[in-house]
Structures are given as C-alpha cells and as structure tokens.
Image (cartoon, rainbow, N blue to C red):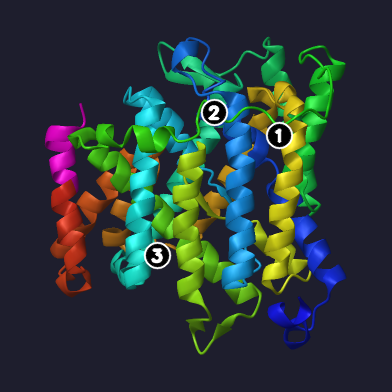
Amino acid sequence: MKRYFEFEKFGTSYRQEIIAGLTTFLAMAYILFVNPSTLSLSGIKDFPDALRMNQDAIFVATALAAAYGSIVMGLYAKYPIALAPGMGLNAFFAFSVVLGSGIPWQTALSGVFVSGILFTILSATGLREKIVNAIPSELKYAIGGGIGLFITFIGLKSSGIIVSNQATFVTLTDFKDKNALLAIFGIVVTVILMTRKVKSAVFIGMILTAIAGVVTGLIDPPSKIVAPIPDISPTFGVAITHLSDVFTKKMFFVVLTFFIVDFFDATGTLIAVANQAGLVKNNKLERAGQALMVDATAVLVGATLGTSTTTSYIESTAGVAAGGRTGFTAVVVGILFLFSLFFSPLLGVVTPAVTAPALVIVGILMVSSIGEINWKEFDIAVPSFLTMVAMPLTYSIATGIAVGFVFYPITKLVAGKRKEIHPIMYVLFVVFVLFFMFFRD
C-alpha cells in the first residue's frame, strides 16, 4: 500500500494520511444532512409532499456517491481529493429546476445523468480542458460568486430570517419567529468558529445549532442515533428509467447549466487542491486525465443512486493542510462516508434553521472568488456583475449564467476587444439569446 501511493516520495505516513482524511471528512460531512434537506425542499412548506424526493433515500445516495467518488479518486487518480454532491448544484436542482420550472425531480435526475455522459465523453477525448479555457476567467469567478449569493439567500429565506414583503418583496424577520432566531444563533456561532480558524467549523456549527434546537424544544430529539441503512429504492435507478423525459427544449438548458457549472467547479477545485499539495509540475497537472474521468463518472453514479451532481470538494484543501499528499487520504474519506450510512436518524434534527449556517458560510466562501475579477474594466465588470446579481434576484443559476454569456460578447465588441472573444462564446451567445426568446416558459 505504501509503495502504491508512494508514501516515501511524498514524505507521508499512514498516520498523517488518516488524520488528513478525517479532517477532510469532518470539513465536508455537512453535505450528508444539507443535501437531503435541499433536494427534498424541506424548507418549502407549501410544496406537495407527493412531489418531494425521499430524504432517507437521498441521505444514502449522498453517502454512497461521496464514497464512490472519493475512493476511486484515491485509488485511480491518486489525488487527495474527496468528492460529494456539490453545493450550488443541489440548489439549482431543487429551487430552479424542480421548484422554479416545475420539472419533476425524476426528470431532473435524468438531466444530471445526461450531463455526466457528456462529461465522460469530453474527459475521455481531452476536449474538457479546451472548453474550460474558452470561457473567460472573469465569468467563471462571477458564476462562483453568484452561486454563493444564491445559496446564501436560500439559507436565509428557508430559515425565516428573510421573509416576503408586499412593498419591498423581501425584508428582515421581526424576530418573533423562534426558528429564525435559532438560525441566527447558528450563523453567529459558525462565524465565530470560522474566524477562529477552527477545523470543521461548518460541521461543528450545525451540531451546536441542532443541540440548541433540541434544548429549547424547537427540534424534536432523535429517538436513536444509529440505525440500519435506509432504503434507497425510491431514488435508485430513477435517472435511467426517465431518460426519455430529458429530450425537451426546457431540459436542454437544464442539462447545459448542470454541465457548465460543474465544469468550472470541478476543474477549479482540482487545480486548487493539486497546487496546494504540490502535484503541479511544470504548470501541468500530473494524472489530470484520470482525475477528470473520476469526476465525470461520479456524476453518473450519483445520478443513478439518486442525487444531484457529484463533484470534487474544495474542502479537500483542509486535509491537504493537515498533511494529506496521496490518494490514501481520499480513500479514508470514502470509507468514513460509508460508516456514516448508519447515522440516518440524525436527519430528523437537521431543520432549515440548522442548515442555514452551512449555506451562509459556504456562500461567503464562494463569493470570495469575485476578488479575482478586474472591476476597473467596464467591459468585464458588466457581464460579471449581471451574472452574479441575476442568480439570487431571479432565483435561478441558469438565468444568471445566460445573462452573463449574452452581455460578455456585446461589451467586448463595443470595447474594441474582438480578439479576446473565443469562437465558443459566440455560440453560447446565440444559445442563450434563444433561451430568453423561446425556452424560458
């Protein structure tokens, strides 16, 4: 095992890699509870239960998808990178596709599966990197920042901190809602932990918020902590059996959005973690092809199990900071996700008030990407800004991406910078103009 993962080459050990794996797992374990809550739209009170996804099945799908992606990434690509259903993408799935567009979750899962097929093909042919390079970096950063704003707004809204108002559309709660106060408590606690650079701050913040909810009587305590693994049959294989539903004009843009967002998310995470771990040699990623292929197949596996897009996690940097240098770190993370399958009873204490701190903090971290945008160049600032603000204001990640991709060629052409526009951007301009004209209904 030491020889396979080249422990000597990277100056690491079993102890160091196990600690790193545990660190990464704790940093991202919140997804086990946030993902079922998000995909089942648990924070939406007036949504018909018959149209919701089964939370227990999502929990199992989340753990298994994370286990598969992390273990295979470790064994095949030998990277200390863990995978799980991605934040932002699950929000797009639930709030934009299912809630906003009225698309059944079964069809949405099929859309994720189709995007996984596209990823696999592009990863196998080497086209994935070329397409990523065609999209201007400013829009990549703006997409990340916009998603951060969007999921933060979802967290504040679902927990009751932000409420509707006839005059101003939204406003701050009057603080009579005890669940909103619980969410505010959780946010404050998590912010303190993050500021103090406490490892696994988001996960610990959720635990403390849940405990506070139980102590105050706002959350019913779980009848038990450990239980047999729940039934995954409500979601397993649904993506494949509903593939025929994907071939509609509305689903075309849903699949395109899944595809574009994960494209940037996974590739950016891979580069960031690899750089931190010292795996970039001569400005090239070692075994990049294997890592991209694992990420692509994880989307297929996750959709088949019953969850939104599975992707590489930036929280992997926590494990690298703790000393993780080889794929053994990712294998440890995957094994821990398998063990977590026995803790499904804890789902009952994860209310919108408990998930709100995680959504807000992850949103803050994602918004930090906009610091890389050159705001002094107006031709860059316009599409970047509109991409960001359109996402929370229209409650749609897809609309934000579309707005940015429409304005980018316009501002660049007017600024006399035609040579900076890649031909692919003209194609995307036409695609998204058609989206606004004919396909948004």
Q: At numbered mark 2, what does the secondary structure look like: helix, strand or loop?
A: loop
The label shown at residue 233 is 2
Q: CA distance from mark 2 to mark 1?
A: 35 Å
Disc 2 marks a residue whose amino acid type is: Ser
Disc 3 marks a residue whose amino acid type is: Asn
Pick the residue in front: 199 or 16: 16
Disc 1 marks a residue whose amino acid type is: Ile
Q: Residue at x 56, y 43 (%)?
A: 363
Give residue 377's quadrant in the image. bottom left
The label shown at residue 2 is none
The residue range painted magenta reads 432-441
Q: Give above or below for 26 relative to 119.
A: above
Label 1 Cα crowd, 10 Å radius (few <14 / some 14-19 / many 20+)? many
Residue of label 1: 187
* Residue 284 in sight in this render: yes
- Tell us which disc is closer to us: 2 or 3: 2
